[in-house]
Every structure is written in C-alpha cells, then in structure tokens.
Image (spheres, coloured by chain):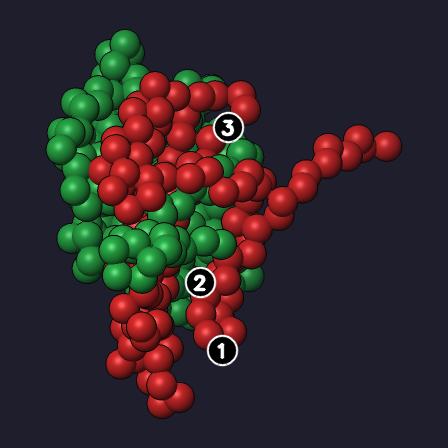
Chain colours: A green, B red
Amino acid sequence: MTGQATGLPTPDLQPAPGPTSKLASSSSGRARPLSYAAAVSCSAAADSSLDLPAPSDVSSASSDDTETTEPSAAATLGSAATTASSTSAPPFSSVHDERPPTAPSAAHERSRSSSRPRQDDCRSPADASRPHRPTHAPPTTAHRMFVSREEGDGDVPLPLNKYTLFETRSCVSKGRCGLWRCSGV
Amino acid sequence: MSDLLCAPLFRSWFYILASSQSTPLTRVLKIDRSPPPPAATGPDAPAPELNVVEDQAVYNERQAGELLRMIEEGNRGTGGLEKVMLFYGIVGFVRFTAGWYMVSPSRSRLCRRS
C-alpha cells in the first residue's frame, strides 16, 4: 500500500484515506450527530485517528484541492507509468483557472474555528445534565477532496459515478519465447 | 524454455479514471498489478502488498485524454495501454490466498423513489 515504487507520496489506505473510504465519507456529506462528536472527544481523546487535521493540512486541503492541479504530480505519475517515455508531460494547467482565487468567508472561518475540540467538552457528571453546547462535526480532509466548489456552496461532493479501467500491457519479446506473451485480465 | 523466461518482465499497472456524468472532472487511481518476484511466491512467502497510488490532481476531459495518450506512448514497446472495462464504483479490495481482488459493481440501475 505504499508508493515506494514510484516515489509519489502515497496515502496509506488503512484505515481512513483509502479510495473506498474516501468515497464512503464523501457520500454522506452530512455532519455527524452532536452526541457522537461529544462522545468521541470525551472517550477517545488519545485516539489519533479521530484527531483533526493540523492547521497546515486544513489550509492546504480546504480551498486549493480542486483548484490546483499539481503539474509535478501529474508529470510524475505519467513519467512513472511510462517506462520508456520520450514525451514530456504536458504542462497541465489548473482545472479552474478561469476563476480567481477566493478568500474563505468569515462565516466559514468561524465554523472552522468552532469545529476544534474544546476542553469543556469533557464535562463532569454533574455538568452532564446541562444542555450540551452545539458543535460542528469537523469536515475531514477526505471529504474535502471530493468537493466541487463549482456546484454550489462547497458542500456538494463531486459525484464520481463512472469508472474506466485501463491496463498497461506487459508483453515479452518473441525473440526467445517464440510468441508474444502478454499479461491480461 | 522455462516459464520464468517467458514471464512478464515489465511493471504493469491498472489505471482507473473516475469521472462524473454531470461534470467533466476526472480523478486517477493507479494500481500495481505486477506479479510478485519468484522468490516471494512460496508457501511461506509473505502476502503481497497492495500498491495503490492516488493522484491528487483533478483532470478535466482534455487533460485526462492527454494523460492516457502519454501512458500509451510510453508503454508502446510492451503492448501499450488497453481499455478493460467500465464500472460504477469501488466497493473495496479483498485478498484471498493468491492476491488482491477489487470489488466493483459493473451494472447500475436508477431506481425511482415511490
């Protein structure tokens, strides 16, 4: 599950950032119940898998995910796949180049800052009878990756409903074996 | 001639292009399908790893076509690139005794809510 063969930073597929988990997380598109968020923050404070992304992760994954098409990543992927490629990777421009970069709104910043877990979420049993302060469930990085801002206010996941499978053939020369032998499905 | 000499010698990949029917945006997933080395195929050999590379870029229709053309050109000497199938999602990856299998629906039907 690592990308050591290509040198690309490959996300670990266990447990959360895999392709299937991302699709599953993006398909919900709704905030978790408040009671769930409170239970998570109280009972599993040391669970690293439930931690929020670091501020650097949030800033890098919030608004630039759908705008910046990484030319280097695209070129690296292509060059890694092409074992004997003589063509250089085309300078892929951004998908949304026509749109000027927009700063996050104040309401969005407010909701982002309020999504941080607070110490007073772990209340004592005496305080448990009071109504719980409403908090927003933090949007995950995997959720943001499948968000298309062109379809609305940024909460509409990009529907990926058409998948095409390609394979690179791996044929050996017929010089020694007498026949072409190709890998196939 | 032994089968070892006729075995695939080059690295082979699956490419999954995921797109939407409403927006022409495409994500790319790359899966290594190279066979394990002969030394790692014995009964006591460790299970092969699933090597999946997710491209972080979002391609439009033209860029996705350029990417496919580039892969096709680069692998022309070993057979090029071939379209295998069309499917409608990725359920997950499971591993049985020999290797990994991708579970994916190959048919879709739009149900009307009554």
Q: Does residue B41 appear left or right of residue A185 in this picture? A: left
Q: Are marks 3 and 1 on the same chain?
A: yes
Q: Does residue A169 appear left or right of residue B110 in this picture? A: left
Q: CA distance from mark 2 to mark 1?
A: 37 Å
Q: Residues within 10 Å of mark 3 (few under 14, many from 20)?
A: some
Nearer to us of marks 3 and 1 is 1
**Mark 2 element type:** helix
Query: Tag 1, which chain?
Result: B
Residue at horizontal 40%, vertical 88%? B43
Q: Residues within 10 Å of mark 2 (few under 14, many from 20)?
A: some
Q: Are marks 3 and 2 on the same chain?
A: no
Residue A13, numbered circle: none
Residue under circle 2? A40
Residue at horizontal 31%, vertical 73%? B1
- Dot 3 or dot 1: first in sequence order is 3
Q: Position of residue B71 (x, y in %)?
A: 28, 36
Residue B20, numbered circle: 3
Q: Amino acid at mark 2?
A: Val
Residue under circle 1? B97
Pick the residue in front: B77 or A154. Answer: B77
